[in-house]
Image (tube, rainbow, N blue to C red):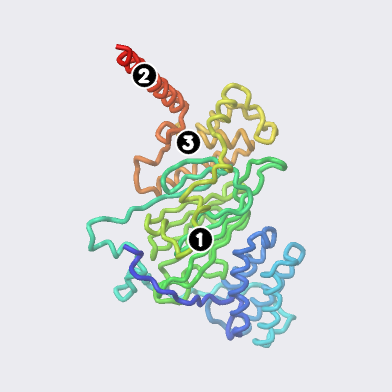
Amino acid sequence: MQPQRERREVRSRAGWMVMGKGGRPSALNVGKILTLLIYVFPTVSLQCKILRCNSEFWASTSSAGPEEEFCTALRAYNTCVRRTARTCRGDLAYHSAQHGIEDLMSQHNCSREGPTSQPRPRTPPPPRPDSQERSDGPEICHYERGYQRHSAAPNYTHCGFFGDPHLRTFSDDFQTCKVEGAWPLIHNKYLSVQVTNTPVLPGSSATATSKLTIIFKNFQECVDQKMYHAETDELPAAFADGSKNGGERHGASALRVVEKVPGQHVEIQARYIGTTIVVRQVGRYLTFAVRMPEEVATSAEDGDNQDLYLCLHGCPLNQRIDFRAFRARAAEGHGSRGRAGAPHHGFTYQSAMAKCKERLPVEDLYFQSCVFDLLTSGDINFTLAAYYAFEDAKMLHSNKDKFHIFERALGVGSAAPRDVSALSLALLHLLALLLWTQCCSAQL
């Protein structure tokens, strides 16, 4: 069943977050272009913290209030933007915010002089009922409703990306990869996910995720196009435009951002496509996990190339790291140095195993990835990254028998090559016997 049924294109109504009351059409156009550029060129805002200023301004002006309060919030926003000048010069979001502030100051006759403290929090209006639960809510905005009349439930898949970095694909393959720079994890008809991985140590090929961008495409009467962007020390509790749901459409609450632990753990629920995404910051790096119906995961627009979609196809062969060889060298005492020759910061193979055992008592591939990361980076936070990746897999994976992944089950264990070699030798012996028998028969 196509989720949910025949889809139709709906033009995005995403606007510019700082338009306030009476925003001009030009500001809306700038917002659309800006959102696209941030996604296409994510490195632009690596050090710039303009999104924090935007989110704070939106939060203080999200409900109607006196003009004086709006001007106070606008002056505070202007102060926040000026503080980012050194790190944001050349950033399109920064320069757009500057021009937008000038525009809004003029529209609302706000003086540049005056209080800049944030207005006192207003009592929020009663929450609107979830459109997914209301009887008059659009059924198409609740993915699982389409299955209530069918015997077969949707087949859910899970993908995880964490650590240095390790990938668990939708088909439960487990890989350790290099993938430095920007790479697409997911790209289908409904959303796109891109990660940016940076070296853990100067000159090292060990990398970890420092930025993550998610684009939710507009979908019928459910949601407007939304972008979520996170980076090191910046894990927002809202989309890039400051909102926490899918916009102004009837089923907007079918998409929402939920902050679980401020600055550390965010969950994005996209119920209109049956999808849950978990983003965490552990130490200095980000982790990603998703639960998604198989038909959504494999959907593609006509002409789209999904070859580099890591969650679906895994890492390219030239980007994969020989996990077994590294572990074998480390276990034999030859792995005293990392991939780039850097010392292991005091971690031996045995001490790394002992540290990982504290959080991951089962020696599965999550445990092995933990040991690998400690040896290649020396960063003890990777222990928690592997632990939370496993906890997210338990929450998001639909098959409890597949929570743990072991090398033997994947055919990459140390026993697998010996078994293959033994089988090959036996076949050669059988072939030799058959040839010898045929020769003897011909002579007779």
Indicate left or right for 167 with 284 as reference.
Answer: left
Residue 435 is labelled as 2
Q: Which residue is mark 1?
A: 192
Q: Residue at x 49, y 65 (%)?
A: 216
The tag earlier along the polypeptide, 1 or 3, is: 1
Callout 2 secondary element: helix
Residue 319: image quadrant is top right
Q: Residues within 10 Å of mark 3 (few under 14, many from 20)?
A: some
On screen, residue 213 above or below 405: below
Q: Amino acid at mark 1?
A: Ser
The tag earlier along the polypeptide, 2 or 3, is: 3
Please state which of the two labelled residues, at mark 1 or mark 3, is closer to the viewer.
Answer: 1
Question: How far separated are the C-alphas under marks 2 and 3?
Answer: 44 Å
Q: Amino acid at mark 2?
A: Leu
Callout 1 secondary element: strand
Are discs 1 and 3 less than 8 Å apart at CB?
Answer: no
Q: Amino acid at mark 3?
A: Leu
